[in-house]
Image (cartoon, helix red, strand yellow):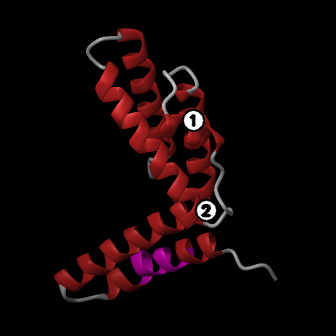
Amino acid sequence: MIPEPGRALTDLAMRLLFNVAPQTANTFAAADAGLVGQLVMTLGQEFERAVSTRMQDIDQMKALLRNAPLTADRESFLDQQPASLHLRDVNAVHDAGMRLISAWHAEVETTDDQLNRRIWSFLRDHSERHRFD
């Protein structure tokens, strides 16, 4: 059997929310169990999609930066791929791209309305991809 950690975390969260929290007489403990349940559920959701959402972000950042004036940092990022699909390696590339996008946005947000809007469009897409249900 292949373990499904995202599913397991969701099942644990549901047990906390629907079995443990309602049985807790202390309202603080019940609220705490509910909070932990919600956090475990969001952790399960993030586990399932983390690499995919970040890779989509990386692809979109690269597409944006291909239209930016080339600097050594930007050129290096365009050639970068994660060392593996482990989340820490994907996060390293994602973080580098976000830093470049942020710095570029600071350069163009008041001087180039079209680029400003394209970067805001990326940021909207990014936040939607990372939104929790």
What residue would you read off at disc 2? 48
* Above or below for 20 versus 45: below
- Residue 75, percent from left and from top: 57, 35
- Residue 11, percent from left and from top: 56, 76
Asked if residue 9 can be seen in this view, the reply is yes
Q: Which stretch is magenta?
A: 11-19
Identity of the amino acid at label 1? Answer: Glu
Image quadrant where residue 84 sits: bottom right
Identity of the amino acid at label 2? Answer: Glu
Disc 2 crowd rating (10 Å Cα; few below 14, some 14-19, many 20+) is some
Which residue occupies the foreground of this view, 124 or 89? Answer: 89
Q: Is residue 109 left or right of residue 38?
A: left
**The N terminus - image quarter:** bottom right
Residue at image position (47%, 68%) is: 43
Secondary structure of residue under mark 2: helix
Image quadrant where residue 38 sits: bottom left
- Please say whether residue 17 is one of the residues in the magenta stretch: yes
Q: Which mark is residue 124?
A: none
What residue would you read off at disc 1? 75
Q: Is residue 120 left or right of residue 89?
A: left
- Please say whether residue 107 is one of the residues in the magenta stretch: no
Secondary structure of residue under mark 1: helix
Residue at image position (56%, 49%) is: 54
Image quadrant where residue 79 sits: top right
Residue at image position (47%, 75%) is: 13
Identify the main secondary structure in magenta: helix
